[in-house]
Image (tube, rainbow, N blue to C red):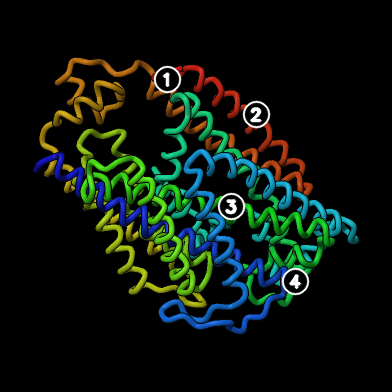
Amino acid sequence: YRPSTTRSVLRVFKVFFDGILINCVIMASVTLAMTKIIKAILHLSESPVITIPVVGDITSTGILLLILGGSAVLYSCLSGLYGVVYTDLFQFVLAMIGCIGLSILVYVDASRSEGGMVALLSSSPGFTDSSIKFFPDFTSMDILSFTFVVYIFVGITGDQGSGYFVQRLLATRSEKDSFLAFLWYNICHYVLRPWPWILVGLLSLHYLPDLKDSESAFPLMMDKFLPVGLKGIMVASLLAAFMSTIDTMLNCGSSYLVNDLYRPFIKPGKTQRHYVFVSRISMIVLTIIALIVTTKLTGILNAYKYLSVILGGTGTVLIARWYWWRVNAITEVVAIVASFIVGNAVEILLPSTEGADLFAIRVLITTLSVTVLWVVVALFTSKQPNDKTIEFYSKLKVPGIGWKRVRDITNINSTDGKFRYNFLGWISCVFFLYSLMLGIGKCLFHQWHWAGVYLVTAMISGYLLKYSISKISFMSK
């Protein structure tokens, strides 16, 4: 076992797994979403304009998406990370204005009905009491309840350490700026963004009772409610969201390909100008792959379910590496390969049917089996802390029982109280985000008692979060 060789293998695996596979599936899913939006808003014909081998039929919608994707590639190539960050900021604001504006119009219209929005929803086909409940009925513990538990406690771990998150965080001025930026991202992601989508989606049960493709509900509601001027702003906001995701994935994917594959292993020692040129070519290649994947997708939700299954096995190792010195490059390689193999195997062997969605079972099987495998590998491959492990600990002074052996070898004490405050910050942040999100929802549905409970919980947890942040020792100010 040679650490440098194993780390090199891990870098190459991450290029193909994160940089190409994950990025291209995400780009394909948002491209499919944009296709559905354009079809609904512009009423474009689905008849093919041209047929291309491998790709298949190209419609007028596809041609428009090629133009939009090409625009994202163009400014991503010309401006790099700074251009992506600045345009993303503008695009996010524009997208939120459009989504919030639509949700307000729909909410006001529904509230004018006799009995208000809740009564209108209650009489809608396909609506049940569970439609507006965050927590399912645990007394029966059916497949829906099981899926909720698995997703909250297992499936969500697969999103740890995403490359585009790391890329943005490393571009900040200090560790504290990085920390606060990611906290703000989570507030935007879990509190600001969901409710406009949820409201419009729920009320589509009433306004679009015969809808067959649920993933087209949002653009069809736009087409139904928005006047010409506002509809243009809303389309622009969704195009902004599409471009924002595409440019982020392209910038991240090209960084993987150039910095972790091409530069160290294929063409080392070239000029910076050469590597920038190669990164631009890689963006074009990634876009082509994503467009091909788009033609194979059967639905947006199916793409993210697939990612949750094949990423579920990697989530535990990505978390454990911060708390256990035995987690090394070999264990990460094993987790990635095993998660991909097991995830695809259960996708084939345990497909969902119309009567039973086995998504949660697939995630659980992948996560548990891969976790057992990488833990065994870690025990056999990490007998003693190596130089890199000691160097890592010496810089960060990681607390916790998982680093006790390294502390004994180095005689360097961990940061006092850091683990305690980190744990408090994590728990309080989870309660703050979900309490605030659920409290807003209870207000919208006029459930004032629960709204008060959630909002008071948000205030208390928000104070504890602020307190824990003040106790954290950042590496730089």
Q: Residue at x 60, y 64 (%)?
A: 34
- Which residue is disc 3 drawn over? 135
Amino acid beneath label 2: Met
Residue 472 image position (x, y, % from top left): 44, 20
> Does residue 146 appear anywhere in the picture?
no
Q: Secondary structure at mark 3?
A: loop
The CA distance from mark 1 to mark 4 is: 51 Å
Q: Tell me the distance, in whole angstroms, between the alpha carbons under discs 1 and 2.
A: 25 Å
Say which amino acid is labelled 4: Leu
The residue labelled by disc 4 is 208
Tag 1: Cα neighbours inside 10 Å, few (<14), some, or many (≥20)? some
Contact between marks 4 and 3 (CB within 8 A): the answer is no
- The residue identified by callout 2 is 459
**Tag 3 and tag 2, C-beta contact below 8 Å:** no
Q: State which tag comes first along the sequence, 1 or 2.
A: 2
Q: What residue did someone put label 1 on?
A: 474
* Residue 41: image location, x then y, percent: 72, 68
Q: Earlier in the sequence, mark 1 or mark 4?
A: 4
Q: Residues within 10 Å of mark 3 (few under 14, many from 20)?
A: few
Query: In the rendered structure, which amino acid carries the disc numbered 1?
Result: Phe
Within 10 Å of disc 2 (Cα), the crowding (few <14, some 14-19, many 20+) is: some
* Apparent side of residue 328 relative to residue 106 in the rendered image (left or right): left
**Spatial separation of the CA atoms under disc 4 and disc 3:** 26 Å
Q: Which mark is residue 157?
A: none
Q: Residue at x 33, y 63 (%)?
A: 343
Q: Amino acid at mark 3?
A: Phe
Relative to residue 357, is residue 450 drawn left or right? right
